[in-house]
Image (spheres, rainbow, N blue to C red):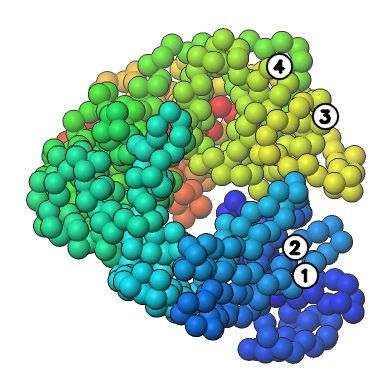
Amino acid sequence: MVEYSEEVYRRILDTYYVYCPKHNTMEAYMDISDDRVVSETGCCFKGLLGFAKIYRRYGEINDKPVFIPYRWRIYQSAPSKCINIACDVMRVQDTVNGILTRWINYSLSVDFVSEKYVISQIKQKDDTYINWTDTDLEIPDVVVETAIEIMRESTLYATGIKPSVLCQIKNKYTVLGYMKRPFDPNIVFLKTFFKYFLSRDSYYIFDEIFSREEKNNYKVMCDLLEIKPPKSLRKAYTFNPYAIVWYMIFKQWGIKDINYMHKFFYLDECIASMQLNKFYYDKETKHVARERWDSARRWEVVEFYCKWLLEQKGEKKMLKWLYSVSEDIVLNQLQWDILFSFRDYYNNLSEEVKTRLLRDGLTDYVHDAISVEVTALSERWESTKIKYNKVEQGYACKINGYEFRLLPNTNMLSKLGAAFNNCVASYRYSIMRHDSVIIYVMNDKDYLACIELQNENHIVQALGKYNFPLSKEVNDVCYYWAQHNNLEIDVNHISPISKEELVLFDDAVIEPIPYIKAVDEMNLEELLNLDVKQIYDGYYLRLEQLLSESNKYPLSAPYWMEFADEASRLTYLLPEGERIFKEAGHGNTEAMLALGLMYFKGRVIIQDYDKSLEWLNKAAELGNREAANMINKVKNYMNKKLSKRDLAILSGLSAMRHRVAVGELG
C-alpha cells in the first residue's frame, strides 16, 4: 500500500493506493482489512500488508526509495559467536513506469570476541554505497531491547563484564552505540556535540578520547568541559545522553537552581523545536551552538528570548516556558516571527509592547502589536520610487486573472512583508542598488507569490505566505510567466510543468499592467479627485487615515438640525468623507470597516464604540475577515479601558492589515 504526500508540507492525501500487476497501474483502494485489500477496479489482494510513504511535489517523480520492514530476526548460536540482526525489507521506488518493488535482506553482524561488525550496504544512484542504518528504516523497541540484551551476554563472555544499559532512547543509534561502545553506548549520541571540540591538526580524535574500553566517559567529559556538575546529572546521563547538553546550555545562561533543571535532563528530542543532536560545543567561546545559518539564527533568537525572560521573570518562570515548548509543543511560524522580530528590533520596540509580550507570551495579539511597530519603523525610511528598464516593465502583466506586479517603491516593502509574513522588507538596499527585482503575484484581493530576480533575468526565490511553497495552480502560472519572459529559474521554488499542461496556456490572454500611482502615494486631494472607476481596494482605508490625520477635533451638528439618515449627518459634518459614508451604506465592506474605525478613533467624528461595533459587525457578516478580527479587540479595549498607546497600536494594526492591498495598482 502506497501513501502519497507532498514533500514539503508532508500532507497525507486522502487515500492509499495499491499496485495492481494485472493492470500495471496504481489503484485507489475500495476496501481494506488486516490482510486483504480490494482496489477500485475490483482486484483483490490477500496477505501481509505493508505501507510506504512516497513524497511527490505536484506530480513530480521522487525516485528516492522507501523501505518497508516485514520481519525482524535476531540470531546467535552461542554467546561466543557472532550476533546477527536481520530484517526482510521491501524496497519501494516511484518511477515513470510505475512503482517498482524488490525484496532485500538487511543485516547487522556483531562479533564481540574479535571486536568486529559488518553492516549491509545499499547502492545509490551515483554508484556510491551507504549503510542501511543510514536510511530512515527504524528498528522497533522490542528489537532494540532484545538485541542489546543478547549483546550484553556476549560482552560478558568476551570481557567478564555485563554492562548496564539504561538509556531511554531506543532506536538504531542505541544498537550502533552499544556495538561501538559497549561500556557506554550513550557517548556515541554525543559525537556531534564534541565534533569541533575534539580535533587535533584537522584530525578528529573522538575515538581516541572516548575509547571503546573506557568505562567512565562521564568523568572524561566533565574534565574536557571543565565542569563539576551536581550528582543528579550523572544519574540523568545514564538515561539520557543529552542531559549533558541541557546542563551546558543552562550553565552558559547562568542558571543556578538544579531543581528547576532536573526535569529537562530527561528530554531527549528537542529544545524549542530544535533537535538536541544538532548542537555542538565550541571550545573557544565555551558555548553551546548550532550549525547552518538558519538553525543558528533560530537558536540565537531563542537564546535571546530565554535570557530576557530570565532577567525579567526569573529562573522558574523562564524554564516553565522553555519546558512547555520543548516537551510536546512545536513553535509555529507566527511564534517564530515574534521571536525574530523581538530579537532584531529589540532596541526600537516600545516598553509597552515588551510588557505585553512578557504578560501574554507568543500570542497572536503580541504578534500583531510587534508587527505594527516593526512596520512603523520600516515606514520611517524615505520612500524611493523604483525605476525599471523596458524589459523589466514587461514583467508586469495579467495572465488569466493573475496579476504580476513590479514593486513600485521601497515603501511598499513593509506592506509586502506584512502581506506575506516574510522578511522582504529587509531587501530595501539591494532593491535600491538594483541587485534584486521584486515581483509580487495577486489574484483578486489576495497576495499569492513573492518572486525575486537577480542578475537581470534569474529567478532566485518564489514563495508564498510564510515562505511556504506555491500551490499547484500558482506554480503553473508562474512557470508560464517565466517562460513567456525568458527568465531562468535557478531554484526549485517553481516546478516545471509538462508540455501537455503548458498547452493549456496557449489561449491565455496576457495584458500589460501600466503603472498607476498607488493609493498610499496619493495625498488627500488626489484621493478626493480620483475618478470613481479607478477606486480599488485600499482606497477607503487610506482616505480614512488621511482624514484622521488632517482633522484633529471631531465636529458635531447643531442640536436643532435634523437629517434623513446617518450618511447625511456624517456628510454634513465631514464632506470629504462622503464616499466612505455612502459606500458603507451601499454594502462596501472596506468602507464599513473604515467607518467603524472612524467611530472607534473619535478623530473626525465623535467617538462611539457602539456605532463602531455596529459597522464592524455589518462588514464581518458580509465576509470581511479583518472586521471580524477587529470586533473582539474593540470589545477588549472597551472592557479594559486601556491607554491611548493601546488605541494607537490597534489603529496602526488595523491600518497595516487592511492596507496590504495598497500596492494594488489598478
Label 4: which secondary element: loop
Residues under labels 1 and 3: Cα distance? 41 Å
Contact check, label 2 and label 1, Cβ < 8 Å: yes
Disc 3 versus disc 4: nearer the observer: 4
Q: Nearer the viewer, residue 289 or 582?
A: 289
Disc 2 versus disc 3: nearer the observer: 2
**What type is the residue that disc 4 sits on?**
Glu
> Mark 2 = which residue?
93
Residues under labels 4 and 2: Cα distance? 40 Å
Q: Is residue 13 visible in this depiction of the protein? A: no
Residues under labels 3 and 4: Cα distance? 15 Å
Q: Nearer the viewer, residue 358 or 407?
A: 358
**What type is the residue that disc 3 sits on?**
His
> Mark 4 = which residue?
456
> Mark 1 = which residue?
101
* Residue 249 sits above or below residue 384 on the image: below
Relative image position of residue 25 (x, y in whole percent): 85, 71
> Mark 3 = which residue?
484
Q: Is residue 35 visible in this depiction of the protein? A: yes
Residues under labels 2 and 3: Cα distance? 35 Å
Please name the residue shown 61% across and 24% down the image: 438
* Residue 498 sits above or below residue 551 on the image: below
